[in-house]
Image (cartoon, helix red, strand yellow):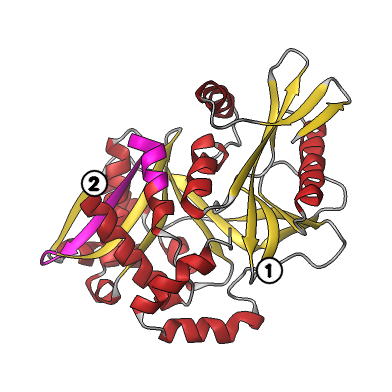
Amino acid sequence: MNVPILPSALALRTADLRDPAERARIEAWVQTQAEATPFHLPHWSMAVAHGCGQRSHYLVAERANGAFAGVLPLTELHSPFFGRALASAGFGVGGGVLAAAPGVARQLADGAMALARRLHCTTVELRGGVRPGGEWQEDAETYLGFVRPIAVDDDAELLAIPRKQRAEVRRALGNQLEVMTGRGAEHARAHYAIYAESVRNLGTPVFPKRLFTEVMARFGEAADILIVRHQGVAVASVLSLYWNGTVYPYWGGGTAAARGLRANDRMYFALMGHARARGCDRFDFGRSKAGTGAAAFKKNWGFEPVPLTYFKRTTDGSTPRSVNPLDPKYSLQVRTWKRMPLWAANRVGPWIAKGLG
């Protein structure tokens, strides 16, 4: 898509992410933006497109001299269950409009709406970023974000954790648990098996295995997997991204045995130390839905919740799509999925999940 020249000497166009030079220019600009996330990087858009078979449309706003003024990574989602949508960023928890000025943000958002109409996508979802203004619906109540500094060493990290949770971490440290990190095929297989079981137990379908493979490949050394084993058996695992001094533990979970072993506590404490050794000074615990056990777990670790503001708009004035598993209309599906045999959930789940975005 190429949109005509805009006011204020700005032009919108769709970046060609197949071009290494184009990707490098975008990444360099994103690196300079304080509100940027890994989900704004071309790596993410390409991993999602190749990993889930959903098309990427990476909008850039350029000044007359060719300098970037803003970007908006969009994923075109097709699902027989959840309809057609443009999401920024697809399969990310962030990645909304990234712009040097509010006027640029409005133009990028308008460009997303124009693209949605052309692609027959009913809903546009912007996850965070600069407020687009206009008729966009804002939601600052559903999701919470959790970020805090990483302490200078393990002893200081323990003291930074509130007393009750600190006791749980100490118990985990006393268990016979082995921690390993890496990027190899063995790590990938173990992680996917654990993650698939974990999300099945929560009642949600697992993403395609190729999405994880693509993220690992495209982020290179900026991504790895940390696994916790008990008596040689992997019981907890997390795939993390590292960017601009922050670790993002993104896809993590544990088996049924992990709870009694406190393997998740061991996992996240070990990740803090591992990220520190990699030069990170911030831990982004990701988002959780308000009022859930996951949000309470992160608060127990000493993370203060901050509301995340998302934006939605439809091209025809209808109600935006909802993919929130806490929505009462999905309660039967969630209960059914929890009882599904793991082999069946792993076979059917990726086909459903790739349309969630």
Mark 1 neighbour density, 10 Å: few (under 14) some (14–19) many (20 or more):
some
Picture disc at residue 184: 2
Residue stretch in magenta: 214-232
Q: Secondary structure at mark 2?
A: loop
Q: Are marks 2 and 1 in contact (CB under 8 Å)?
A: no
**Residue 132 visible somewhere in the drawing:** no
Quadrant of res 60: top right
On the image, the x and y values in percent for residue 41 come to 53, 36
Which of the two labelled residues, at mark 2 and mark 1, occupies the earlier sequence position?
A: 2
Expressed as whole percent of the image width and height from the top left, the position of residue 193 reads: 30, 65
Residue 289, position as x, y percentages in the image: 57, 66
Q: Looking at the picture, which amino acid does disc 1 mark? A: Ser
The amino acid at mark 2 is Gly
Q: Determine whether, in the image, residue 184 is placed left or right of residue 132.
A: left
Question: Above or below — where is 119 with respect to 46?
Answer: below
Q: Is residue 219 above or below residue 145?
A: above
Q: On the image, numbered disc 1 is attached to which residue?
A: 322
Q: Is residue 60 visible?
A: yes
Q: Which residue is more in the foreground, 46 or 106?
A: 46
| Residue drawn at the location 37% of the way across and 41% of the way down | 217
> For the residues marked 2 and 1, what is the alpha-carbon distance in whole angstroms?
36 Å
Front residue of 252 and 79: 79
Horizontally, residue 338 falls left or right of residue 128, namely left
* Residue depicted at 44% across the width and 60% down the height: 208
User: Residue 255, relative to residue 355: is it above or below?
Assistant: below
